[in-house]
Amino acid sequence: MTNNIEQEKFNKIVEGAEEFIEINAKNILNKLRGTNHEKCFDIIKEKYHPLCRNLDGTVFEFNKESVLKRFCIQLQNYQKRPQTIDYLSHSYHPESDNNNILNLHTDDNEIFEYMKSNNKKDADSIYNYFHKLDRFEEKSHKNGCYNHNWRLYAKGLAKVSELISDDNYINELKILCEEVDKEASQINQSCDNKIIEKVEKFFKGNQKISGMDSVLPYDFLKELYCLNLVKVDTHIKEIYKFIFHSEDTTDEILIKFIKLCLNLQKEKYDKYTPYYIDKIFWLCSTGNFYEDGITIQKMTRRNFFKFIDYKIKLKNK
């Protein structure tokens, strides 16, 4: 259970996160997009939402292609793979890049198109395909782990290729998303362990995918469909410690964090879904506005915490 002091502190951090984005990112993103958004929620909802759902709950097409697209992104997020695979990465820094150059990998779409073809693919075939990518050789020679990471990425995608070739898998995944999202939205009235049990059961056994360990299944479901989930990553854990001054298990943090979000949602506005709050915390801590192709360097977890600490002390005076 969370008490009123903890909930109030959490609410202030959310309010501070929105203000942090409005101060540091609003003008840059409006200029880049050609928009005139004033509020954080409007800035975020335009581009940052699950692949198959909008922040207002509108459902887009949930099919084989959308699931595959999410897996292509998700499977590079395991351990050091993001530095190797760099799926949908960029190198545009508004404060330091006077040329405003945005470097997206053109071959990321090629990976998706290659995996999208109907025939199943084995790990070796996928790995051999990666050799054709412009960035493969340039990164492989720098560190021995690069080749290993590409092989693990290929292994995960091979399993995905096998799974999504069966329409039943897509249907079962959609049912899982709907059930988990609904149960998470009612977590204050239901058994906490239901969500964890369902997610773990689905991603184990014959359906286990290399690179989908730990909290990544939750991140996958969140970024695919579920507005009521969070990913318990380093940023969420640090904010959790800031509120509770304790280090609980990942499962305990997941449940408590969802409850904090839903309490705020009940007190204020429907917009405060766990997904939205998770997203603004992550953006504040990394400055990585990946859907816009920019990184705002002064938006770091350290600067975000300094800003939050200042705001809370100011309000308590």
Image: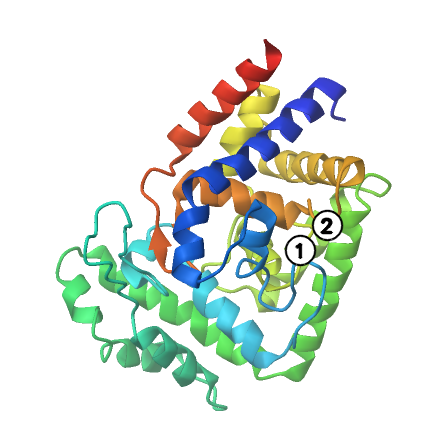
Residue drawn at 31 percent across, 63 percent down = 85
- The location of residue 44, given as percent across then percent down, is 55, 53
Element at badge 2?
helix
Q: Is residue 25 left or right of residue 14?
A: left
Q: Is residue 188 left or right of residue 58?
A: right
Badge number at residue 40: none
Residue drawn at 44 percent across, 65 percent down = 73
Residue 313 lies in quadrant? top right
Which quarter of the rendered picture does the C terminus lie within?
Answer: top right
Q: Identity of the amino acid at label 1?
A: Val
Which quarter of the rendered picture does the N terminus lie within?
Answer: top right
Residue 83 shows up from this direction: yes
- The location of residue 223, given as percent across then percent down, is 57, 59
How many numbered circles are shown?
2
Q: Identity of the amino acid at label 2?
A: Ile
Where does label 2 land, which residue?
Answer: 195
Residue drawn at 35 percent across, 55 percent down = 294
Where does label 1 land, which residue?
Answer: 199
Asked if marks 2 and 1 touch (Cβ < 8 Å), the reply is yes
Residue 231 shows up from this direction: no
Element at badge 1?
helix
Q: Is residue 157 above or below residue 144?
A: below
- The location of residue 152, given as percent across then percent down, is 36, 64
